[in-house]
Amino acid sequence: MSDRWVPDDDLDPPDWVNAGSSPSRPPTPDRRPPPRDQRPPARRGNPERRPPAPREERGRPAGPPHQRGATRGRAAPPPTQGAPRQGAAPPRRPAPPPDAPAANGPTANGPARDRTGTARPPRQRKPTPAEPDLRVEDADEYLDDEAEDSESPEIGDALEKKGVVGSSFAFQLYAKMKGAGPFQDGPYQLRTNLGVRDAVSKLEAGPQQGHTDIELTLPPGLTLQQIAQKVEEQLPGRTAAKFLEVANSGTVRSRYQPAEVTSLEGLLFPDTYLVAKSEDEEAVLRKLVENFDQKADAVGLTAGAAAVGRTPYEAVVIGSLIEREAGVEEDRPLISAVVYNRLRDGMPLQIDATLCYIKGGCQGPLSNADKEVESPYNTYKVAALPPTPISSVGEASLRAAVAPAAVPFKFYVLSDASGKHAFAETQEQHDANVQAAREKGLL
């Protein structure tokens, strides 16, 4: 510390001094001249010496060094205490200390601020693109993915959802880098955790041959012969003859098929199936039989048949009669009741659908000669169930076959063009219903 005396110039120090800052270099010195009473005495020279030419003549402004900022041509008066003189240049700002916060930069005590002092949100860095997921892991699950002829974002999202790739974005990035796509429409067999590289390779190779599914639609009430014809019509490369050969060979059997029965008549469930190109007639037949067994299990066919005193296969036969005779849903339990009541009383069922089965179909009204044909399926002459079902059976008819309505009816005849029937308990009531149907032109 020095004891040197420094005159007080009555100037306030800059704000950063009172704020406790410790600059590593002093501020720019004040270049204003001191008051006249504090100036050093002028140097005295030879009075006879010619004074130097005015500064204006030498191309420099006149006046002592402390007046160089004043207006040229006249001497600047000394500063006065208090307010600055009018027209004078403003004093220079002191340089901020090195550790003072910048106008726009962040500080240790807060976020970055602009020139007005308003805090700005931190600058967000751009995300780094994810690396393509090229891992290939073993997995037992396989997925049949239908890849549409579209851009890779939709396919990438589908593959990520199914777990084939880990990232849709990585798939899109890799496909774009390889110039892959658009991909061909069709089925693809892709395992989970396959990885981006292998997924793109498999999609570029195209859909698997021999795995394109074709719909096979089988409505209820078709005979085995009619189903075979549908197979030939709807599935290219299959024939009705081959289908019937397998169906009657015993190669494919239903769990509800008695040991002495070789035909699968009535044991093929009516439904819409997806059949692959690689599936032959036997594979198609197996698909239909397995579906029937599952639906019969759901209905409770075994327990339901036992409750009404019939075997499961007999219940299927009754179900086929209901399927061929019922025109509206509410008639199914009522027709079932008629069948059970007539069987109980030893009466022939007299169901026209059995005669149509014998004939291979009915193109018009049945004749009396049709009712006299010798066949175990002729329910006009045989007081028993047919030996096999006469058509495929839907679920509603299977349920009605094991749950007949609790009514005493033994007769029914068509009563409405919608397929509704009129039911009767006695022959006289039935004859009246038949006459009414004839008057309506239904018979």
Image (cartoon, rainbow, N blue to C red):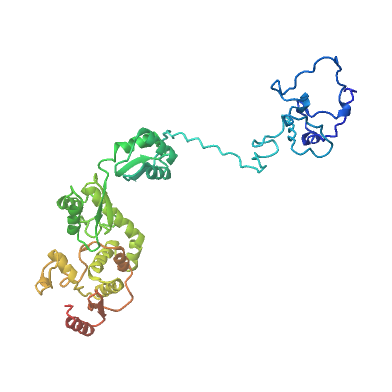
**Res 248 seen here:** no
Q: In the figure, is residue 249 to the left or right of 310?
A: left
Q: Is residue 18 above or below residue 260?
A: above
Q: Is residue 142 above or below residue 349?
A: above
Q: In the figure, is residue 263 to the left or right of 293?
A: left
Q: Is the C terminus in the top left, top right, bottom left or bottom right quadrant?
A: bottom left
The foreground one among 436 and 101 is 101
Give the number of callouts: 0
Residue at image x 16%, y 65%? 357
Residue at image x 32%, y 45%? 148
Quadrant in the picture for residue 25: top right
The foreground one among 106 and 18 is 18
Residue at image x 33%, y 56%? 294
Q: Residue furthest left?
A: 369
**Res 303 seen here:** yes
Q: Is the N terminus in the top left, top right, bottom left or bottom right quadrant?
A: top right
Quadrant in the picture for residue 261: bottom left
The foreground one among 63 and 381 is 63
Query: Residue 218: x and y, percent?
Result: 24, 58
Query: Residue 197: x and y, percent?
Result: 38, 34
Q: In the figure, is residue 319 to the left or right of 160?
A: left
Query: Residue 28: x and y, percent?
Result: 75, 27
The foreground one among 193 and 198 is 198
Query: Residue 129: x and y, percent?
Result: 48, 35
